[in-house]
Image (cartoon, helix red, strand yellow):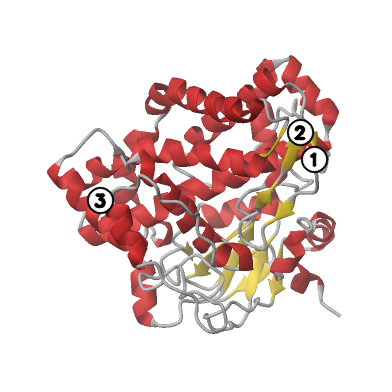
Amino acid sequence: MSSDTDVIVDPDTYLVDIPHALFARLRAEHAVVWMDEPEVPLWPLGPGFWGVLRHAEIKQVMRDPATYSSYARATQISDPPDDETLDFVRQMMLNQDPPRHSRLRRMLASAFTPKAVARLEDRIAGWARELVDRVADDGRCDFAELAADLPLRTLAEVFGVPREDRWLMYDWSNRVIGYQDPEYAVSTRAGAEGATDMARRAMVLRPEPDEHGYLPNQRTREGMPDLYAYAHDLAEFKRRRPGEDVMSNLVTAGVTTEEFENMFWLLSVAGNETLRNALPGGMHALLQHRDEYRKVREDRSLLPGAVEEMLRWWSPVMRFRRTATVDTELGGREIRAGDKVVVWFSSGNRDERVFAEPDRFDVTRTQNDHLAFGHGPHYCIGAHLAKTQMRALFTAVFDRLGEVEPAGEPVRLRSNFQHGVKHLPISW
């Protein structure tokens, strides 16, 4: 029989739902619990980790990179298999601590300020209306597929990636985030019609699965030669013809080619996948709570708060790992230097100590200090842009489709990392 913590780390659990009742029972007893590690293809099985379940202790970990490091052993539960891989993943901003992390973040910050996002708002709203208009006469669609295109269009605009190449980011995200899901791990979006020469050259390098059906690990350069080849060509292109986009700013600011390539990996995957899961996750929450759907549709002033509640309720990113750099104490537990410490946002976002009636989906909730975008130095730099896109797409749905209904069961992503929806059929 599986233990409680085995259920939490098992990616099969999330094919049904987040085990909120189990988290609540464990959270009532301890802020921090010991968990065994799940098996991950192509990565060594590790010794286990401390799972952080309560809101306050999650914040404590996330705001203290000196004690709980992203750089020491990176931010996924499994340790990189060798020093060469560790050195490689440490180049990514996600796996760095201040001050190096701060330097790279400052280079990106200007593109994601509220003022910068406001300049994009009309275009984002137009893209959202276009996506919804495209299916309006059909009477039904897969909302997960429809929603996936909005972050791709937006990121292509912000990054200066040719729009016809945005499907590449869809494929890369599937392979990286869906490594625990057999459908996503080896899937690719067919049809590169109209793609640039850069994209066509990159696709030639796309790796094939081995005899067991596994791709090379998608968090390494060898596992994603197509992405890195594309990023290399894009950096050279931006040096020759800089624009007003993020990637042009990076190359003119003096980042190295390696830094550029790793930044492109992070933004193409993390910048796409979180919102891609938050959008259908938010719709799923509304469909399960029809009175809340009607409240927002009839009173659009509730939409900003409803978006915050969708993010709390769904928790698109469920957990992240840190490594203790010194002996310390957390939630009454003795943590040793070198121990893995994994914060579970999906638990913290239902913490009874912070949220009144945490299992109730309430679009009028005013006290909503959720952790969907993290906390501390690594708080998601694109949070404002993500929420702008969520408001735009739900506005388009309410305006054009009215009240939608479920048209089948959602199909969830097999993952204990990203809370994903692969398919969400709806009708109207």
Q: Is there a contact, CB below 8 Å, between mark 3 and mark 2?
A: no
> How many marks are shown on the rendered structure?
3
Badge number at residue 427: 2
Q: Residue 414 appears in which quarter of the rendering?
A: bottom right
User: Looking at the image, which residue is at 62% across and 43% down?
Assistant: 278
Pick whichever of labels 1 and 2 is earlier in the sequence. Answer: 1
Mark 1 Cα-neighbour bin, 10 Å: few <14, some 14–19, many ≥20: some
User: Looking at the image, which residue is at 44% across and 37% down?
Assistant: 153
Secondary element under disc 2, as helix, strand or loop, is strand
Q: Residue 154 appears in which quarter of the rendering?
A: top left
Residue 333: % across, % down: 67, 69
Residue 65: % across, % down: 46, 58
Cα separation, mark 1 vs mark 2, equals: 6 Å
The residue to which callout 3 is attached is 234
Residue 302: % across, % down: 69, 20
Q: Is there a contact, CB below 8 Å, between mark 1 and mark 2?
A: yes
Cα separation, mark 3 vs mark 2, equals: 40 Å
Badge number at residue 407: 1
Secondary element under disc 3, as helix, strand or loop, is helix
Of 59 and 406, the residue lying toward us: 406
**Residue 308 position (above or below residue 125):** below
User: Looking at the image, which residue is at 82% across and 38% down?
Assistant: 288
**Quarter that holds the N terminus:** bottom right
**Callout 2 amino acid:** Ser
